[in-house]
């Protein structure tokens, strides 16, 4: 894990803490399943587990999650990020640029390290909350 990757995850954590307080908790609705958690899978990352495909389908007007097109999913995730962040996502950013800057995605080589860092943060918070 590079310090640059850890910094990106830290930015994502700050975003999540502001936009979705308690997102890391085990006892919250739509709790993140660490056994399934994987940044490289669009359906198993932080944003997807906190905002399931069914919710995105509803927001884009799709009939169901299976009918979402890749472009719909990109648009829906970006719209969700904008909604969650109350406009903090800059208009001049693409979804990929925003997500990369916040540790929600990266290039293929970065995915395992990003996944491990998110898991480390979530596990640490969950352990601290039990004390």
Image: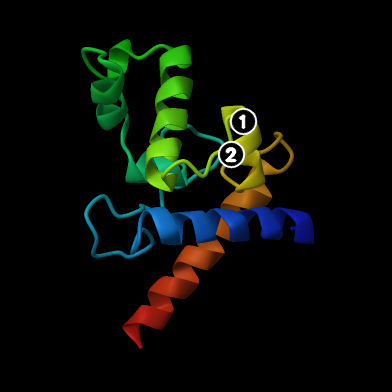
- Are the residues tagged 1 and 2 within 8 Å (C-beta)? yes
Residue 92 picture location, percent across and down = 64, 29
* Quarter-of-image position of residue 39: top right
Residue position for label 2: 99
* Quarter-of-image position of residue 53: top left
- Residue drawn at the location 23% of the way across and 23% of the way down: 58
Residue 64 picture location, percent across and down = 23, 17
Please indicate whether residue 50 sits to the left or right of residue 111 in the image.
Answer: left
* Quarter-of-image position of residue 73: top left
Residue 55 against residue 104 in the figure, above or below? above
For residue 96, the mark is 1
Residue 62 against residue 109 in the figure, above or below? above
Residue 70 picture location, percent across and down = 47, 15
- Residue drawn at the location 46% of the way across and 64% of the way down: 122
Considering the image in quadrants, where does the N terminus appear? bottom right
User: Quick one: SS at disc 1?
Assistant: helix
Q: Is residue 34 visible?
A: no
What color scheme is it? rainbow
Considering the image in quadrants, where does the C terminus appear? bottom left
């Amino acid at each position: 894990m590079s310090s640059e990757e850890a910094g990106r995850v830290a930015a994502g954590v700050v975003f999540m803490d502001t936009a979705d307080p308690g997102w890391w908790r085990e006892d919250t609705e739509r709790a993140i399943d660490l056994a399934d958690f994987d940044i490289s899978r669009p359906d198993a990352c932080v944003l997807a587990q906190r905002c399931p495909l069914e919710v995105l389908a509803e927001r884009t007007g799709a009939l169901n999650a299976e009918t979402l097109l890749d472009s719909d999913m990109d648009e829906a995730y970006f719209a969700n990020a904008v909604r969650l962040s109350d406009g903090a996502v800059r208009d001049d950013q693409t979804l990929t640029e925003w997500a990369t800057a916040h540790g929600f995605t990266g290039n293929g080589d970065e995915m395992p390290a990003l996944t491990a860092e998110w898991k480390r943060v979530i596990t640490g918070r969950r352990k601290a909350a039990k004390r």
